[in-house]
Image (spheres, helix red, strand yellow):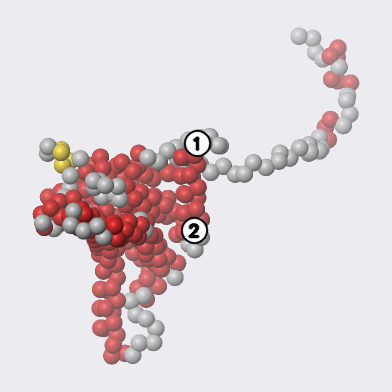
C-alpha cells in the first residue's frame, strides 16, 4: 500500500500542518462579518453645560486683553 | 492489477520535485478575502458557509471552548474542500494519505486532552472510572478507559483515510469494469448508473468531514466542559 511508504511522510505532514494551522486560518480570519446596518440615532442628546447658561460680559471681544 | 490500482495513492512527485506541497496548499488559495460590505458571489458564498458552520458548531460550547472556533472552522473547510477536489478525475486527494490525517488528528486530540488536564484536572481524571462500578472491576476498567482514550486519535485518522481511499478505489474499479464491459454487452448502462450513484454517494464525503469535525468537537466538549 503506497500510503505506508514512510519516506514521504515528513513532507506531507509538514505541508499539511503549515496549510491547516497557518494558511487557512489566515484566510478565514480575514473575512469580516459586519453588523446589520441599523438606523443612526438622530435625536441630539441634550447636554447640560452649567457654565454656558449666561453669556457674560467678559466674552465680548472689546473687553478681552489687548494683544 | 494491484500495482495499477494503488498507483493513484502514491505521493506525487514530478521529476523528483515534491508536487504534493502545491497540491495540499491549493484549496487555501481558493479562499478569497475582501473588505467590502457587498462582495461578489464567490466571496459571499464563502462568508455564508463560514457563518453557517460557526453558528452550527460553536453554539454548544462554553466560552472557553469557543476560542477554538477558528481552528474548527478551518479544519472543516480544509478537509471538505480537499475531499471535494479529489472527486475530480485524475486528481490526487491528500486526505488518502495516512500521514496527513495522523498529522491532523494527533495534535488536535492532544490539545484537547491537555486543555482538559490543565483546567479541570479532577473531572478529566474522573472520566477513567464511570460511576457505580463494582470494586473488583476497577483496575481493569481503568485500563480499558485509558486504551479507549489513546485510541481516539488513531480512530480519527484511520477513519478518514480508510473512507476516502475505499471510495476512490471503488470508483476506479467500477469505472474500469464499465469500460471493459462496453464492448462485451450493452447492459453496461446499468453499471454506468451504479457509478453515478456511487459518485453521488461519495460526494457525501463531505459528510465525512462532518463526522471528523464532530468527533473532534465532541472530544473537545467532553474534555473541556463536563
Q: Do the residues at pointers 1 and 2 share their chain? A: yes
- Nearer to me, B208 or B137: B208
Give the quarter of the image for residue B38. Answer: top right
With respect to residue B196, does B24 lie above or below?
A: above
Q: Is residue B152 visible?
A: yes
Picture residue at 42% right of the left edge, 52% below the top:
B73
Quarter of the picture containing the C terminus of chain B is bottom left
- Nearer to me, B70 or B76: B76
Of labels 1 and 2, the one closer to you? 1
Circle 2 sits on which residue?
B56
Give the quarter of the image for residue A19. Answer: top left
Circle 1 sits on which residue?
B40
Picture residue at 29% right of the left edge, 60% below the top:
B190
Q: Counting other residues with Cα less than 10 Å from the Cα at mark 2, is it few (<14), some (14-19), or many (20 or more)? A: few
Picture residue at 36% right of the left edge, 57% below the top:
B200
Quarter of the picture containing the N terminus of chain B is bottom left
Badge 2 marks a residue whose secondary structure is helix
Badge 1 marks a residue whose secondary structure is loop
With respect to residue A21, does B194 lie above or below?
A: below
Q: Earlier in the sequence, mark 1 or mark 2?
A: 1
With respect to residue B33, does B157 lie above or below?
A: below
Give the quarter of the image for residue B202. Answer: bottom left
Return the x and y of residue B6 as percentages of the image width and height: 15, 55
Label 1, label 2: how far apart the Cα atoms are: 24 Å
Is residue A42 left or right of A1 when viewed as pictured? right
Return the x and y of residue B40 as percentages of the image width and height: 50, 36
Q: Name the subunit of mark 2.
A: B
Return the x and y of residue B62 as percentages of the image width and height: 49, 62
Return the x and y of residue A46 as percentages of the image width and height: 81, 38
Q: Counting other residues with Cα less than 10 Å from the Cα at mark 1, is it few (<14), some (14-19), or many (20 or more)? A: few
Amino acid at each position: 500500500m503506497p500510503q505506508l511508504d514512510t519516506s514521504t511522510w515528513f513532507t506531507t505532514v509538514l505541508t499539511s500542518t503549515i496549510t491547516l494551522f497557518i494558511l487557512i486560518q489566515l484566510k478565514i480570519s480575514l473575512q469580516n462579518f459586519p453588523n446589520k446596518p441599523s438606523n443612526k440615532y438622530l435625536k441630539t442628546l441634550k447636554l447640560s453645560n452649567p457654565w454656558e447658561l449666561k453669556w457674560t460680559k467678559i466674552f465680548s471681544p472689546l473687553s478681552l486683553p489687548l494683544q | 492489477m494491484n500495482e495499477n490500482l494503488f498507483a493513484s495513492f502514491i505521493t506525487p512527485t514530478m521529476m523528483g520535485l515534491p508536487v504534493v506541497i502545491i497540491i495540499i496548499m491549493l484549496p487555501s488559495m481558493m479562499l478569497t478575502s475582501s473588505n467590502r460590505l457587498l462582495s461578489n458571489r464567490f466571496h459571499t458564498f464563502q462568508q455564508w458557509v463560514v457563518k453557517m458552520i460557526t453558528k452550527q458548531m460553536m453554539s454548544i460550547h462554553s466560552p472557553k471552548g469557543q476560542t477554538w472556533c477558528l481552528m474548527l472552522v478551518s479544519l472543516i473547510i480544509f478537509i471538505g474542500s480537499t475531499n471535494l477536489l479529489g472527486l475530480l478525475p485524475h486528481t490526487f486527494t491528500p486526505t488518502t494519505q495516512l500521514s496527513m490525517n495522523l498529522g491532523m488528528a494527533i495534535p488536535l486530540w492532544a490539545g484537547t486532552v491537555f486543555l482538559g488536564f490543565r483546567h479541570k484536572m479532577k473531572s478529566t481524571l474522573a472520566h477513567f472510572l464511570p460511576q457505580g462500578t463494582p470494586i473488583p472491576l476497577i483496575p481493569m476498567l481503568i485500563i480499558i478507559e485509558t486504551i479507549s482514550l489513546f485510541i481516539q486519535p488513531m480512530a480519527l485518522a484511520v477513519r478518514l483515510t480508510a473512507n476516502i481511499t475505499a471510495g476512490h478505489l471503488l470508483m476506479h474499479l467500477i469505472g474500469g469494469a464499465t469500460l471493459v464491459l462496453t464492448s462485451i454487452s450493452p447492459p453496461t448502462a446499468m453499471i454506468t448508473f451504479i457509478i453515478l450513484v456511487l459518485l453521488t454517494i461519495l460526494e457525501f464525503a463531505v459528510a465525512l468531514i462532518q463526522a471528523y469535525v464532530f468527533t473532534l468537537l465532541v472530544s473537545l466538549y467532553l474534555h473541556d466542559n463536563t
